[in-house]
Image (cartoon, grey):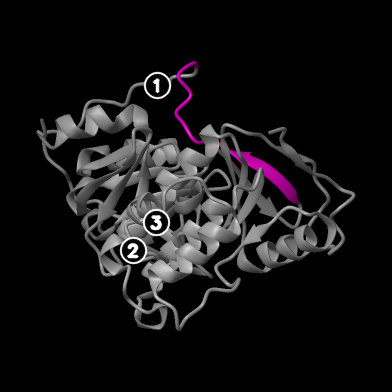
Amino acid sequence: MAPFVINQEILTSGAFSPFYLAVGDFQATAIYSDPDIQHELVKDLRSNTDIPVFDHQDGLYMRLTVESNIAFFHKWFGCREPLSEILVRFELQHDAKKPLHKCSESEIRRVCFAKYYMSGVPSAVFCEPIHGADIKTIHTFVRMLQTMKEQPTAVLILVSNLEHALLVGDVVYKLQPSGIKPVETEEDAATPEPESAAAPAFAKLFKISAKVDEKMILFDPPEIDYIESQDGKAMIVINNEKYAMDATMMETEKKLEAYGFYRCHRSYIVNLQKVREIITWSKNAYSLRIDNKIQSTIPLSRTKIQDIQEKFNLE
């Protein structure tokens, strides 16, 4: 399957500057933007291309069972994979006899995924595929995505969450009104960062500052969940609330290393004391689950998986 292209000829909304983007096969491309811009991009794609946009709102039959829904679309699309294998692939075998209107949102999402998968389209756009989904459903989407890439299918994924973009996208872009720019997804081995100074034997009184409006707020390192990079600046994140720092990620990494913080990804520095779980989505996709009120997940670079396992003394 040849890649499809988004170019200035199809961008008519005026919500953002025109851009050219080739969406290749054998990899998934993710675009991270705020919901309003995403909505305008979806409108443009639907109005000016024949590429299917999947957003979980196309028709399922709520009075039918899970199995009956999948059987209908299995026949409709002429899917060659056995129906029983489709149920297992999307972890729906235990819910097969349940009417769809009695299913959870995540179970319905997996039925949608099964429908999209069986359609066999050569190219597809997914809109917020894992937003609000449970762990099982995210695993299912990541596995489906891997299979689609191998077929190959050209896949574009639109999200409003950077963590989701980094999880599902092999290539990630950030779309703003001023235009589109790439987001680095892996550490740049060719340009190593300078080694940090040796950590002090004990931590002195220390606060991390962030600016909100005209006020300067001081945070104790233990209360911080993680640090996120946005447009080259570091953002403190506590229970999904973000506070801008007047510092780069490299500067912040050096300051916080002695307090149990770790650069788990180019765009993230995590408080290791807050890590509850290491999640393996696939052989190349990992996340850290944070022990906070909203159970945040942040990306873990595949180059860091062994290092962090050693930090936690894991085999």
Nearer-the-camera pick, 60 or 236: 60
Nearer-the-camera pick, 258 or 95: 95
Nearer-the-camera pick, 294 or 169: 169
Relative image position of residue 181 (x, y in whole percent):
67, 42
Q: Specify the quadrant that holds the C terminus.
A: top left
Q: Is there any visible trace of residue 296 in the rendered image? A: no
Residue picked out by circle 2: 134
Residue picked out by circle 3: 236
Q: For the residue labelled by badge 3, is the local secondary structure a helix, a strand or a loop?
A: strand
Q: Which residues are the magenta region? A: 179-190
* Distance from the alpha carbon under mark 2 to that under mark 3: 25 Å
273 relative position to 253: left or right = left
Instruction: Please give the count of numbered marks on the rendered protein.
Output: 3
State yes or no: residue 185 in magenta. Answer: yes
Relative image position of residue 59 (x, y in whole percent):
59, 74
* Above or below, comparing residue 220 to residue 27 in the picture: below
Q: For the residue labelled by badge 2, is the local secondary structure a helix, a strand or a loop?
A: loop
* Distance from the alpha carbon under mark 2 to that under mark 1: 39 Å
* Distance from the alpha carbon under mark 1 to that under mark 3: 23 Å
In the rendered structure, which disc, 2 or 3, sits on the residue that comes first in sequence?
Answer: 2
Residue picked out by circle 1: 194
Dot in front, 2 or 1? 2
Residue type, mark 3 in image: Ile
In the rendered structure, which disc, 1 or 3, sits on the residue that comes first in sequence?
Answer: 1
